[in-house]
Image (tube, rainbow, N blue to C red):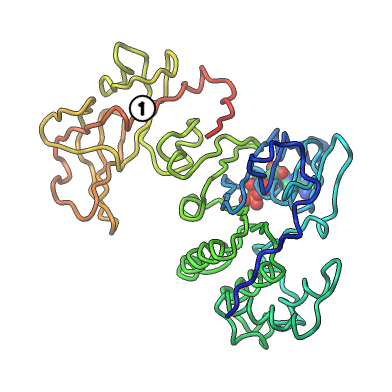
Amino acid sequence: MTQLTTSSALGVQRDARPSDAPQPAIEIRHLTKHFRRRDGSTVPAIDGASLDIQDGEFIVLLGPSGCGKTTLLRSVAGLETPDSGAITVGGKAVFDSGSGTNLGADRRELSMVFQSYALWPHMTAAQNVRYPLENQRGARQGRAAMNERVAEALGAVGIGDLGGQYPNQLSGGQQQRVALARALVNNSKVVLFDEPLSNVDAKVRESLRIELLAMQRRFGFTALFVTHDQAEAMELATRIAVLDRGKVQQFGTPDEIYARPATEYVAKFIGNTNELHGRRAEGGYETPLGLVRTPQDAGDQATVLFRPEHAELSAERPGTASALPGRVVAVLFMGTHTEFLVRSGETRMRIWVSGRSTDFAEGDEVWVGLREDHVMVFPAAQDRGDQPEGEG
Ligand SMILES: Nc1ncnc2c1ncn2[C@@H]1O[C@H](COP(=O)(O)OP(=O)(O)OP(=O)(O)O)[C@@H](O)[C@H]1O
């Protein structure tokens, strides 16, 4: 099969930037968007968001329901009009509140894959995929060339034999493949995904993720992908933008976001955490379970977090920087790891040991050992006010 070539017809009207600087595939500057509710109040769906996305990146917009990720994606697509800010795609201004620029969705030279697939029910899979080619601006290709492109795109997503089927004759996973083929068929350099895998079952979702990544590498498009599923974000993203109430809390690689979360919100949203509260003391924070050593300073009162997979359990007091005493109150085998629930006074901690561990049983007195670099501290809520916006 011949590979779909990437179009070079994009990227006109570049802005003033040194010629050797890479041109962001998508640039989002100080974007804001409020919605008016029925009771007359307004809600800031996007609140000063800025992101620079490079060519070929796979960017995931991640956050809980209502954090504004869909509104941000739809603003890039041209399906929502922001109140202020600017967006460029391939160097071309598609929205700019300053100059009044606001290109229609069909002039932004990008494709979108929706959660609902959004296929035409009266068209076959092949007709659905051909649709953007038939309706594209500028010179239209001949029928034979279009059919060849459609066959290539369907083959690329693994459903070359299903072109004659109607959507209601296809499974959810197959329908989403049709939607993906339709997004790829006209070689868009930017593809936007609005929770595209949330309607397919877990097994299909897993394999579609892997195929999606392979396809993105192969075709080289830049992906902007919305999800509320942190595992999906970690697996797909070159960088993740974590959103909270319309603000970008952190924009960084999955590694950075997991190991060095910029805020307590990010630390708790990505992965699992144990939580203690402490007062600043010599060498760290004094918590109800003793001193937790850390060189970090988060003010006088702090929330002290550590991940279940980062603590070690031992019968004797360990030589780690910090050692917290407790008693095992439950042992749960989770398949990939064993979870020990450890109680110490009012504090409960979850500690994970990989595989099946029978080292400790319910009722055992244990020590929870922590290394300094596994401790995260953030200003306590009462000292914090609004959390600062983080950049990864
Ligand atoms: N058309 C609308 N009218 C009024 N409020 C809206 C509208 N669309 C979104 N909102 C509000 O804007 C905020 C952000 O919504 P958005 O759909 O972008 O969030 P989200 O993170 O994508 O959530 P979800 O994962 O549930 O789709 C929410 O508070 C939502 O209620």
Going by the picture, which residue comes out furthest to the left?
Answer: 316
Q: Position of residue 86 (x, y in %)?
A: 77, 39
Residue in the image at 59% along x and 24% along y: 386
Residue 15, above or below 389: below
**Dot 1: what SS?**
strand
User: Given the image, on which type of amino acid does mark 1 rest?
Assistant: Leu
Total marks placed: 1
**Is 87 or 41 nearer to us in this picture?**
87
Q: Nearer the viewer, residue 348 or 217?
A: 217
Q: Position of residue 349 (x, y in %)?
A: 30, 37
**Residue at numbered disc 1:** 276
Residue 381 or residue 116, whichever sits in front: 116
Q: Would you identify the image quadrant in which residue 24 lies?
A: top right
Residue in view at x 57 percent, y 51 percent: 57
Point out the image quarter for the N terminus: bottom right
Left/right of residue 298 with respect to residue 176 in the rendered view: left
Rendered position, 75 above or below 259:
below
Q: Residues within 10 Å of mark 1 (few under 14, many from 20)?
A: many
Position of residue 333 relative to residue 242, above or below, is below
Q: Residue lying farthest top?
A: 282
Which residue appears farthest toward the front when viewing the image?
A: 19
In the picture, measured across the screen, residue 161 lies left or right of residue 341, that is right
